[in-house]
Every structure is written in C-alpha cells, then in structure tokens.
Amino acid sequence: MLKMVGNSGQISLGKKYAGKYFEVREQEDGVIVMTPMRVIPESEAWLHTLEMREKLARADAWMDADAPTGTSRWQGRG
C-alpha cells in the first residue's frame, strides 16, 4: 500500500482502521513503524498482570478437571 502524506501532515489508512489506536515509532533510518494497540482503563490494569494470568490459568485447569456432571441440585432451576 502506497500512501502520500497530505498538506496537513496526515495519512488516511482507510475505514478498516477507523477508531483504532497505534503506537507510532520513528527509527533512526527514518522508517516509521505503526503497531496496533489496545488501551485499557487504569482501573482494569490489574486484570492484565502476570499474577492474574496465572490465577486464571489455574482456574481454567480446575474447571477442565472438575467439569460439571449434570447432577447439580440447581439443574433445571432457572
């Protein structure tokens, strides 16, 4: 894809990328690298820590090993 920078200094990447965030880095040789990013609220950052990922992995493993058998007393109540 070849794009030209307009007089305002902007480049249009197309509607596919509308509303998305990118980290923009310029390398020493002038190459510009754009990396798609996701932004999370500071109040949710704890969900993305290594400790939480490990806890979630253990919970997933437990759920796989202890899957419901269908004999729950709550079965069919709601």
Image (cartoon, rainbow, N blue to C red):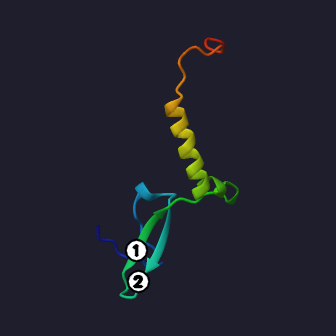
- In this rendering, position of residue 46 left or right of residue 70: right
Q: Amino acid at mark 2?
A: Gln
How far across and down, in percent of the image, does residue 54 sit? 56, 51
Which residue is depicted at the point 53% across and 18% down? 69
Q: Amino acid at mark 1?
A: Val
Front residue of this view, candidates 57 and 11 = 57
- In this rendering, position of residue 73 left or right of residue 69: right
Front residue of this view, candidates 19 and 55 = 55
- In this rendering, position of residue 15 left or right of residue 41: left
Front residue of this view, candidates 60 and 65 = 65
**Badge 1: how crowded within 10 Å, few (<14), some, or many (20+)?**
few
Residue identifier under label 1: 33
How far across and down, in percent of the image, does residue 27 sit? 40, 83
The image shows residue 39, relative to residue 56, as above or below, that is below
Helix, strand or loop under label 1: strand
Front residue of this view, candidates 59 and 39 = 59
Q: Which quarter of the rendered picture does the N terminus lie within?
A: bottom left
In the current view of this chain or complex, which residue is farthest to the left? 1
Pointer 2 and pointer 1: residues touching (CB < 8 Å)? yes
Residue identifier under label 2: 27
Residue 14: assigned label: none
- The alpha-carbon separation of the residues under discs 2 and 1 comes to 8 Å
- In this rendering, position of residue 26 left or right of residue 49: left
Q: Which quarter of the rendered picture does the C terminus lie within?
A: top right
**Badge 2: how crowded within 10 Å, few (<14), some, or many (20+)?**
few
Which residue is depicted at the point 46% across and 74% down? 10
How far across and down, in percent of the image, does residue 65 sit? 50, 32
How far across and down, in percent of the image, does residue 75 sit? 61, 14
Q: Which image quadrant for residue 43? A: bottom right
Which residue is depicted at the point 68% across and 60% down? 42
